[in-house]
Every structure is written in C-alpha cells, then in structure tokens.
Amino acid sequence: MAVPIPVAAAPRRAPAEPWYREVTREQWKAFVAAYLGWVLDGFDFTILTFLLVDIQRSFTVSAALAGALGTITLIFRVAGGIGAGTAADRWGRKGPLMFSILWYSMFAFFSGFATSFRMLFALRALFGIGMGGVWAAGMPLTLEHWPAHLRGTASGMMQSGYSLGFLLSSLVFQLAYPLVNRSNAGWRVMFWIGVLPAFLVLFIIKGVSESPVWLERQRHLRSRQQRDRLSLIGLFAPDVVRTTIHTSILMGAFLFMYHSITFWYPTLLGRMQRPALPYMLALNFGAVTGAVAVGRLSEGALGRRGAATVSTLVGILTIPIYVWTGNSLLLWTGALLMGFFGAGNFGVVPAYLNERFPTVVRAAGAGFAYHVGAGIGSLTPALVGRLQDLGFTLPYAMTICIAASGALVMLLMWVGPETRGREFRAVEDKRQMT
C-alpha cells in the first residue's frame, strides 16, 4: 500500500487591512481640513433657507427679494470657484483654501450686522465668493493626497459634507433658534455663528501639508526653468476645452437634479400638512450616507460612470414614494431613499471632475465645471415654479424635472470616459487630458 506523502499546508493569508488604515496621518489631516471647511460652508449657506421669513419681516421686503439672497450667493459662488481654482493651480491648494474659509466666515459674520436689505444683499453676494472657493481648492488638496485606489471613497465622504452641513442647520434651527429669537433678531445670531469656521484655518496652517502632486509639478517646472500659464486660460486650450465643456454641462445636469429634489420639497410637505423636520432629516441623512456609499462603489467594477448611473436610476424609480404617496411611512422611506440614491449620486463628482483634468489646470478645471454647473442648476427652482404657473401640480413638476435631469446625468456620464484609477502626475501626456 502506498504511503501518503504529507503535503505542507498552504500558508494562511494575513487578513486584508481595512481601507482606512491605508490612509496615512498626513492624508487624513488633508481630508479633515477640506471636509470640515465644506461642512461648515454648507451650514452657513443652508441656514439662510430657514431664516427668510424673519429676514423678510425685519426689512419689509417681498418673498421674491428675500429669495434673491440665495440666488446672488450662488451667482457669486461661480466667481469664487473659478478664482480660487485658478489661484490653487498657480500658488498651491492650501493657501486659497484657507483664504476662502476666512472669507466666507467673515462675511457670514458681517451679515448679522446688516442695517438694510441692500447691505445684507451685498454681504451675501460676497459670502458666495468664499463658498465657491472652498470646493475648488479643498477637493484637489484632499484627492491629490489620497491613494488613487481610495479616491472614490474620499470623494464620497467629501461631497457628503454639504448634506451634513444642511442637516446641522436643520437641527440648529429647530433646537437653538427658539432660544435666541428675541424681537425677531435671532436670524442675526445664526449668521454670527458663521464666524466659527475661521478657527479651522489655525489647524490647516499647522497640521496640513501642501499637495504632493502640486509640489512635484513645481519641482519639475523649476528644473526646466519654466512656468505654467494661467490655468483659467488653459481650460480653453485645444486639448482641454472639450473636457471643460462636457464636465460643465454634466455638472449642470447633476445640480439640476439635486435642486429638483430638494428646493421645493419643504413646500410640498407643507401642502401635504406634514411636519418638515422628520422628512428633511431623512433626506439629508440619506444624502450623507449615499454619497459615501456611491463613492466607495465607484472604486469597484462599476467605476465612476456605473456607480453614478445605478444611483441616479434608482433615484428616478423612487419618485412615486417621494412625491406622490399619502402614506407617512412610505413618504419617509421615499425621502430616505431619494437622499441615498438621488442625491447620493454626487459621491462620484469630486473624484470624477479632478480625474478629468491634468494637474496644470486641475483646480481651475474642477472649480470651473462645478460652479458653472451650479449656475445652470440655479435655474431649476424657477422652472419648477413656472411649470406650476402653467397648471402642473407640484408633484408632477418635480417628477418631470427629476426624471429629465437624471436621464441627462446618465447619458452625459457615458459620453465621457471612465476615470477610475487614473494617476495624478506632474507631467501628463495628451491622452491623460481627455
């Protein structure tokens, strides 16, 4: 009888290290700085939406003029995003991020001292410049620090910060506003709170290092005794202009869908005679967790395009229980799912935009596309209102706009290239610029 030959047992594989342990302390610091700047940015902007009635009463202005405070902020946000992005490509990501945080904190604080509506209008316009700058400078700072294979995760977590800021403003308004609203001056206290992000700059100065990709680019240029042209001009160079146009239109579709979901939703709840807070919390909690999940999903086989498509499609399919149902449980579930999928599709945006542009114009390109898209998306509230004036019900108007813009998001994502896994380099060839 043959004697069996003993076979050595295969060595056990060490368990895979959790993804968050692959991120160094320095990379986490860059993330925290940009993330908190974006969260507090979102808080300072969205708190205005809860204060419009009291501001209208304080200055005796129409609802249209009160609403224009949000519009003028979004318009000037475009200028801030383009300006800070251009500065971040020329002088580094860190400085424009700090400047933008100080800027929006200062003008949020000053807004609480406005003695006339015109003064408040001007201060909110100036606030918008800093608001746009935080995204344009902060996103590349984080994403250029992080490993390429974890960029989708960072992207989702970063973008979720705005929804977290919205959620925080909802809670502060519900819990703290009644305590400070004396003689209709509570709205001023809410704006004064906006100075707090300025202290974040102290952490950035001491704890956050400049983008290693940007520094490598500068070393390369010094070795050749060269200097990059102004990145804003570079966005319209022959090898980049198609990317600039495509990403700007794509972001317009993304933001059109987001505003279709969110802007008129409190009004819809009011017409249904529902308390807004439980549903707004569900919507924004869904948006926070959804952005993280979709960003993480985009690192797998689906890639950036597939993850955005799946998320957007499920968001569209959620419309019946988001705006049409009269059942409280279904309505709350619809808000949660629409936040997770319909707004959560934004989780791929920071990574996708930054991966589309070469290092020499990355901050300006991503900032330009995002904020030009914001300008296009700012037309959404007026369009939904116009559809109602033409005789459409609010649920029907929201359905049309969510579905149409969602379909456009999916189409445009597939018109562009897949970017998952692209390396950020100091010097790119032309294939990496499309």
Image: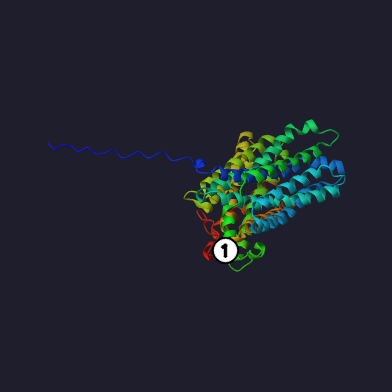
Where residue 55 sits: x, y (%)? 82, 42
Q: Residue at x 71, y 42 (%)?
A: 197
Q: Residue at x 73, y 40 (%)?
A: 196
- Residue 255 visible somewhere in the drawing: no
Residue at the limit of the structure toward the bottom, as seen here: 238
Q: Which residue is mark 1?
A: 223
Q: Is residue 19 above or below residue 83?
A: above
Q: Residue at x 65, y 51 (%)?
A: 94
Q: Can you say which quadrant of the picture contains the N terminus?
A: top left
> Quarter of the image holding residue 269?
top right
Residue at the limit of the structure toward the left, as seen here: 1
Where residue 154 sits: x, y (%)? 56, 46
> Quarter of the image holding residue 2?
top left
Q: Is residue 332 above or below residue 87?
A: above
Q: Is residue 12 above or below residue 130?
A: above
- Secondary structure under tag 1 reads helix
Where residue 49 sits: x, y (%)? 75, 43
- The amino acid on which the numbered mark 1 sits, given as a three-letter code, is Ser
Where residue 116 sits: x, y (%)? 87, 46
* Side of 305 where 46 appears, left or right: right
